[in-house]
Image (cartoon, rainbow, N blue to C red):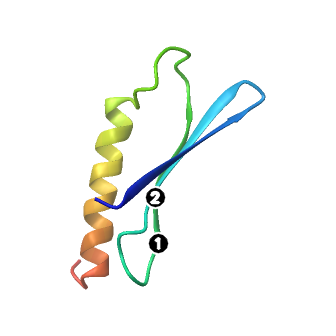
Amino acid sequence: MGVLELIEDYRGDAYRAVYTVRFATRDYVLHVFQKKSRHGIVTPKQDMDLIRERLKRAENLYMGKN
């Protein structure tokens, strides 16, 4: 799909940035957050839903739709 996730640990805290390079002329940052859970690597559903919504909006913006 063209969506990438960066994971960074800093002083014991985990941070994630989700962005897409799917579009030829634009990069969109879809979501950046601090991961709170100490167990597992699963991104919470609330964050995944927000990422999906923002990806849809980015696609519409790129295609000239509102």
Q: Going from the N terminus, do you reach mark 1 or mark 2 first?
A: 2
Task: Return the x and y of residue 32 as percentages of the image width and height.
Answer: 53, 48
Disc 2 designates what residue? 19
| Residue beneath the point at 24% across and 74% down | 60
Q: Residue furthest left?
A: 65
| Residue beneath the point at 52% across and 19% down | 37
The kind of secondary structure element at disc 1 is: loop
| Residue beneath the point at 31% across and 79% down | 62
- On screen, residue 42 versus residue 11, left or right, reads left
Q: Give the residue type that dot 1 points to.
A: Asp
**Image quadrant where residue 13 sits:** top right
Q: How many other residues sit within 10 Å of disc 2, few (<14), some (14-19) or many (≥20)?
A: many
Q: Give the residue type that dot 2 points to.
A: Tyr
Name the foreground residue: 13 vs 24: 24
Q: Count numbered badges in the picture.
A: 2
**Image quadrant where residue 12 sits:** top right
Residue 36, above or below 61: above
The kind of secondary structure element at disc 2 is: strand
Image quarter (top left, top right, bottom left or bottom right) of the N terminus: bottom left
Task: Return the x and y of residue 49 as percentages of the image width and height.
Answer: 29, 42
Task: Return the x and y of residue 59 as percentages of the image width and height.
Answer: 27, 71
Task: Return the x and y of residue 15 as percentages of the image width and height.
Answer: 61, 38
Residue 61, above or below 15: below
Contact between labelled residues 2 and 1, with CB atoms less than 8 Å apart: yes
Q: CA distance from mark 1 to mark 2?
A: 7 Å
Q: How many other residues sit within 10 Å of disc 1, few (<14), some (14-19) or many (≥20)?
A: few
Residue 57, above or below 35: below
Disc 1 designates what residue? 27
Image quarter (top left, top right, bottom left or bottom right) of the C terminus: bottom left
